[in-house]
Amino acid sequence: MAKSIRLNDLQLILLAGAAARDNASLIPLPDNCGQDTARITKAAAALLSHGFVEEKSVTDRSLVWRSENDTLIGLFITEAGRNAIGASDAADCNASKKDSEKDTSPARSGSKIAEVLSLLRREEGATLAELVDATGWLPHTTRAALTGLRKKGHTIAKDRRENATRYRIGTEV
C-alpha cells in the first residue's frame, strides 16, 4: 500500500486553486497564499517531488513559475494532485453543474470521503470532532469536504444537540 502524503494548508490551497482553473495552472497564485516566496517555493517543490504538479513549457507570461534559458515554465496540477484533494474528475472541478445534474454517486469504497458519508448517514449524524478523528483531516479541511458534498448534491443537515453541532445526510431540522 502506498504511503499517504499529508498536505499542509498552503499545498492544499495551491492544488485547489489549480484544480478550479480550466488550464490547471498553479499560477497565478491564489490571493490567500500570502507573499512569502520561500514558503511558496518550498510547498511547490514538495508538490513536484510527490508528482502532484508538473512543470510544462508555457508561452503565456502570466503562467510563468520559472524560466530556464529562454524557456518559460509553468506549474500544472496532475491527476495525482487532483486525487490528493479529492478532485479527480476535471469536469467536476471546472464546470458548475445545475442542481438536476449534481453527482450524488457513492464515493470510492475505502476512501476518506466514503467514511465521512457513512458517519453522516447515521441517524445521530456526526460532530466535526468525530469527522476529524475518522479522517485525520484538519477541521477546516473537513468543513471544506462537507461543502464539496453539498456541491455534489448531497443535502447536509446541521443541528445542535448536547452542546455540539451535528451534521447528517438529510433535510434541515
Image (cartoon, grey):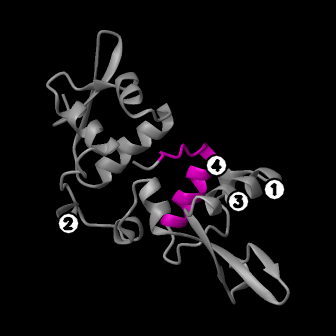
The one of 89 and 128 positioned closer to us in this rendering: 89
Location of mark 1 (residue): 37
Q: Is residue 9 left or right of residue 135?
A: right
Quick one: quadrant of the C terminus? Answer: top left
Q: Are marks 2 and 4 in contact (CB under 8 Å)?
A: no
Q: CA distance from mark 1 to mark 4?
A: 12 Å
Q: Nearer the viewer, mark 2 or mark 4?
A: 4
The one of 158 and 137 positioned closer to us in this rendering: 137
Measured as percent of width and height from the top left, residue 147 is found at 37, 46
Location of mark 4 (residue): 10
Compared to residue 2, the image places residue 63 above or below, namely below
Q: Are marks 3 and 4 in contact (CB under 8 Å)?
A: no
Q: Is residue 37 left or right of residue 156?
A: right
Measured as percent of width and height from the top left, residue 22 is found at 48, 76
Q: Nearer the viewer, mark 2 or mark 1?
A: 1
Location of mark 2 (residue): 101
> Would you say residue 74 sits in the magenta stretch?
no
Q: Amino acid at mark 1?
A: Thr
**Residue 125, numbered circle:** none
- Residue at the spot 81% in from the left edge and 56% down from the top edge: 37
Q: Amino acid at mark 4?
A: Leu
Q: Is residue 152 left or right of residue 138?
A: left
Sequence order check, earlier mark of 1 and 4: 4
Q: Amino acid at mark 3?
A: Ala
Sequence order check, earlier mark of 2 and 1: 1
Q: Are marks 2 and 1 in contact (CB under 8 Å)?
A: no
> Would you say residue 8 sits in the magenta stretch?
yes
Q: Would you call the spot at circle 3 few (<14 residues within 10 Å), some (14-19), or many (20 or more)?
A: few
Measured as percent of width and height from the top left, residue 130 is found at 35, 23
Q: Which residues are magenta?
A: 3-19
Q: Amino acid at mark 2?
A: Glu
